Image: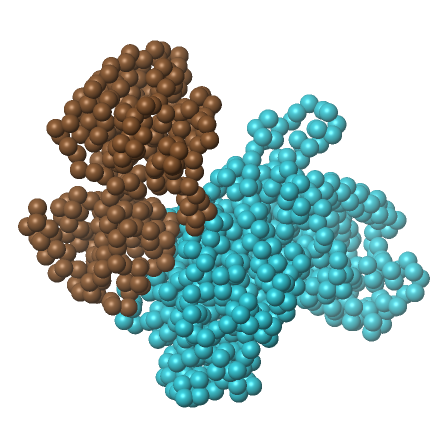
Chain colours: A cyan, B brown
Amino acid sequence: MEIARPLYWNIGAIGMINYILALAAILILVYALYDRIRLWRHGKAAIRFDQAAERIKGVVLYVVGHWRILKDTYPGIMHALIFWGFALLFIGTGLEAFDHYSGLHFLHGTAYITFSFILELAGLAIVLGVLMAAWRRYVTRPSRLDNKPDDLWALLLLFCVVVTGFLVEAARLAALNVPVNAPWERWSFVGWFLSPLFAGGSQAAVLTWHKGIWWVHVVLSYVFIAAIVYTRLLHIITTFISTYTRNLKQAAVNAIEKMEEAETFGVNKLEEFTWVDLMQLDACTRCGRCQDSCPAHLTDKPLNPKQVIQDLKAHLNEMAPVWAQKKTGAAAEQPPEVEAKAVSGGVIADDASWSCTTCGACTTQCPVFIEPWPKLIELRRYMALMESRFPAEVQVAFRNMENNSNPWGIGSATRGDWAAELGVKTLAESPDPEYLLYVGCAGSFDELNKKVSTAVVKILQAAGVSFGILGAEEGCCGDSARKLGNEYLFQMMAQQNIEVMKGYNVKKIITLCPHGYNTLKNEYPQFGGEFAVYHYTEIIAQLIAQRRVTLSKRQNLKVAYHDSCYLGRHNGVYNPPRQILRAIPGVKLVEMKRNKERGFCCGAGGGRMWMEEHLGTRINHARIEDVVQTNPQVVGTACPFCYTMLVDGIKEKELQERYRASDIAELVLAAMDKGKA
Amino acid sequence: MAAIWVYAEHKDGKIKKVAFEILSEAKALAGKSGGPLCAVLIGSGVEGMAAALGSYGAQKVYCVEAADLGAYTTGGYTKALCDLVQQEKPAIVLFGASINGKDLSARVAGRLGVGLATDCTGIGLDDKGRLQVRRPMYAGKVYADVVFSDAAPQMASVRPNVLTLAAPDESRKPEVVKVAAAVKSDDTMVALKEVVKTGGEKVDLTEANIIVSGGRGMKGPEGFQILEELAGVLGGVVGASRAAVDAGWRPQSDQVGQSGKVVTPNLYVACGISGSIQHLAGMGTSKMIVAVNKDPEAPIFKKADYGVVDDLFKIVPAFTQEVKKLQ
């Protein structure tokens, strides 16, 4: 007997029905998928097919390589087992068909044994993965999972397909009398291990069993394929699409183009989202990683990114018949309320939209690159620009930004006053320095943060860096306005700043505030403002490395660095602040449990700085609990918003005796040899 | 000479202070122009308030009354005032830029087809005897002095708490002219069913002349007792910083600051408030700021006209006693 596996062994010609079933299953899959694609296409256009190489790299890394999924160990391994097992079986089945019909017959001998052994492992991996999933979902039940019948069906189906596969093999091996006729089949170790199950019966009975289970296996496999689009299994397909079409410029909010001509702004109807937004709804498997890292959700606010996606998906599904009916003119299946439903305020509650700090944890955690927070920005845009519907405090901030180009409404003419004693020249006084120091609102007006701008200036001066400021000509970067949905105000301020900067022929910019950093670096290019933008921590880290700044005074401090979302998660600047702290003699750098990519927001991003926090508990208090757990002496920050929130949090928790917050620039200045400075 | 009119807004049987403020300064205008200074009271049963208007300088008080004018309605009051203006033809009509004053002045100007200078901070006459008002523009960065080319009447609304209130002279009695307004329920367009009040009886912070505010330094809700006492003797109201509101010591409606109320009293006393920029954004334009804080580094001292670095629990009661002695 040849060392190979005869196809349709014991099944005979009737097994060809298999192909009819396959065709049927694939037709159902294709049609159902086409139906979903048609739904997505109700959304607006989006440019998500550029930079193909980068996108393919992402698919390899994140889908095939599971790079993000594995960051959460148990569910990561669980999913990897299922995914890779499934992938191998899929490829294996294809190979076998190819082997058979191409006439090449390469799967025999050692090749067959290896092939068979690998598929054995793959099947086992799926069983193990499914059991791990069931254990997690139904026994340990982490709060981020909500169980629906859909989840159970998917797991059962997967489990049964693989187990019946093993049983078919076991029955075949039992009938073959492996030790005598096919000793190599011992490598099909799972089937071999299970074959004694069939030992009791006659040869005829075993063959009948084999035939029966074979058909069950085949039918279940096709049920699986046909069911993909109708169940959570849909993510098998959408994950590839959502990863390929992922946002490669995540730190920049989409610009509303040609604001003067647009008739509506933001999103109030599903069709006002892009097709990518709608497709992403079908990529969500409700894994809940987003909610586990969402500062709003974790402090009991009425926002849960997973729920946002699920609510939008439910609305997409109820809108499907409405759209279909509009096309065909058939009688309405859905009550008129469905179509009339507003997305902002109806499907998604206003409080949910306004609770977002745009910290980006949801988008960073999502294994399939779904973007909850940018969708909320679209809802805010609708509320702010179309209906002037926003919390009363936001009105004050908007008006102040309009009138004085800062959210506090302090006279814009006094913007440069903080630097009066420091000998800093404005670009008007002394043009063409190497860098423009873009100070931002907090560094210009807030007493606490003026100390930081002063420290940065002194450090730069000591290092002999050539720089200047804009003084009263500087304007608010507009980050808060944009994140609060007031795109109009943002674009106005952005254009003004760009004009001024270009007027002075600015090439390189150092920013004090991570929000300004992100806005200037990632968003101003949308309006023609192309500058080389650095955060001050990047520059100071470089100056220390070049020994242009020497830190000689011992500090003897245990410092925990709090990552600003806009420096860290949105821009990947995790190391320069840490390098600086490590360079200060005597500073012991410690990490809080949530750090870097998983850093926890201070609560002030997304314009929340200007809003009251009445719902749930305080985000900055939750962060202070992290501080208490790590127990440093100083919490280091590099963001004026974080600085303010941490100072307030420490005061509110009455922990001033134990901890203090400090900007890194202040720590650097304290450690510098003043003689040289 | 043509008359200068001041619309006298009232609530719960009391004239709003802004009407007295306008009368106090309009006296000088009337003196220059030679026309009589009149006040207009609209409502039902308003005659009792006429004397008070007289004591601030109104020579003549029109009491425009009708059964349907019992409560303020835009439609009813507009008709009553327009009818009277068209009949008497005053040269100048001034309003307080309160919520109702802004509403009424805009509607009356529209109905009469004349211009309106809103939210003014100064009133006077130019050398041709025309009304000249000062209006802040660009959020107070510049002032514009505005005159009317040929409006009849010339109309303006004046911001409360800006003009200087003169001492009333009880001996002056105004001439009271009773006018029966031809206002029917059709003119009011809306019917007032009920007034539902929120908060307490106290004066709204944004209208208060004197505010005594407390922050985290008050250490608890009971700490505010001494502020209540001080506010009581000064005739002011109590406000709070966000820290005190967040801690649950004071209601949200007391909050002064960026995300609370923006206030501009004549006197703002900040006790135990460090003066974060958010707080300063809400009270920085107060006329006089007094700060009491233990921490000499507190940013509030940069904004304060007078500062006391000491324990507020010592200072505030002592200060309250001193004020009492003076009274």
Question: Which residue does the image show at 57% across and 48% down from the upper left?
Answer: A487
In the rendered image, the vertical position of residue A130 relative to residue A395, given as above or below: below
* Along the line of sight, the residue nearer the viewer: A224 or B31: B31
Q: Residue at x 22, y 61 (%)?
A: B307
In the depicted view, which residue is nearer to us: A300 or A221?
A300
Using the rendered view, name the quadrant where residue A87 is placed.
Answer: bottom right
Quadrant in which the N terminus of chain B is drawn: top left
On screen, residue B71 above or below A179? above
Residue A285 left/right relative to B10:
right
Q: Residue at x 52, y 42 (%)?
A: A384
Residue A627 location, x and y as percent?
38, 68
Question: What residue is rendered at 43% in x and 50% in y?
Answer: B141
Where is residue A43 drawn, in percent x and y? 68, 42
Quick one: which residue is furthest to the front in this view?
B127
Q: Nearer the viewer, residue B78 or A541?
A: B78
Task: Name the spot of residue A16 as percent of width and height, x first.
Answer: 86, 48
Residue B123 falls in image quadrant:
top left
Q: Within the image, what quadrant is residue B127 found in? A: top left
- Left/right placement of residue B310 relative to residue B153 reads left
- Asked whether residue A193 appears in the rendered view, the answer is no
Q: Is residue A65 visible?
A: yes
Which residue ends up furthest to the left in the rendered image?
B325
Along the line of sight, the residue nearer the viewer: A323 or A138 = A323
Residue B254 higher or lower than A591, as above or below = above
Give percent across and percent down for residue A320: 67, 35
